[in-house]
Amino acid sequence: MVVKELRDFTKALRPPILDDLGIVASIRRLLLDFTERAKIEGKLKVVGEERRLPPDTELCIFRIAQEALRNAERHARATRIIVTIAFAKNEAMCIFRTKSAGVPEQIGHPNGANQATVTE
C-alpha cells in the first residue's frame, strides 16, 4: 500500500509521459484527468509548431499547470478552463483562462473570465 502511494506521488511530481512525449501530451493528460475528477469543462489549444522544450522547462511548466488547475478547482469555482500552449521562435507560453463564478467583476473580466500566463 505504501509503495503504491509513493509511486503515485512520484508520477504526480514528474509523470513518465513528460519525458516520453513532452509538455503538450502531459498537459493534455493532466487536463483530461482534471476535467473527469472536477467535473469542470476543459479545453487545450496548441498555437504554433509544437516542439520539445528543455527538460527543466517542461517540468516547470507542468508543475505550474498542476497548481493552476488545482487553484481553478479549489478557489475560483471555475466552470470552464482553457489551457493554451503557444510556441513562438524563441519562446513558449502557457496561458490558463478560466470562466468562473468565484472572482468579482472588479478583479476579473466582466464576463467572469480570468487569465494567467507563464512564459519561458
Image: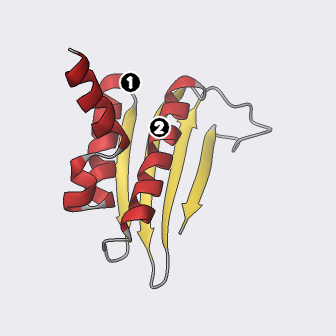
In the picture as drawn, the residue positioned furthest to the front comes out as 3
The tag earlier along the polypeptide, 2 or 1, is: 1
Q: Residue at 46% across / 36% down in the picture?
A: 80
**In the rendered structure, which amino acid carries the disc numbered 1?**
Ala
Mark 1 burial class by Cα count in 10 Å: few <14, some 14-19, many 20+: some
Q: Are marks 2 and 1 in contact (CB under 8 Å)?
A: yes
Residue 69's disc number: 2
Element at label 2: helix
- Quadrant of the rendering where the N terminus is positioned: top left
Q: Is residue 28 above or below residue 78?
A: below
- Position of 47 with respect to 64 (left or right) is left
- Give the vertical position of 107 relative to 92 (above or below): above
20 in relation to 41, above or below = below
Please identify the residue farthest to the top as the structure is shown: 1
Name the residue at 31% across, 59% down: 24
- How far across and down, in percent of the image, does residue 18 sit? 28, 55
State how the image is colored.
secondary structure
In front of the other: 8 or 53: 8
**Where on the picture, by quarter, is residue 22?**
bottom left
Q: Farthest residue in the bottom direction? A: 89
Determine whether 116 is above or below 77 in the image: below
Occupied quadrant, residue 75? top right
Q: Residues within 10 Å of mark 2 (few under 14, many from 20)?
A: many
User: What residue is drawn where x is 36% and y is 46%?
Assistant: 43
Percent position of residue 90, x then y: 49, 83
**Measured Cα–Cα span from mark 2 to mark 1:** 10 Å
Residue at the location (29% across, 34% down)? Answer: 33
Task: Answer left or right for 37 relative to 115.
Answer: left
Residue 31 drawn at (x, y percent): 34, 41
Instruction: Write down the residue under mark 1.
Output: 38
Q: Amino acid at mark 2?
A: Leu
Q: Position of residue 76 (x, y in %)?
A: 59, 29
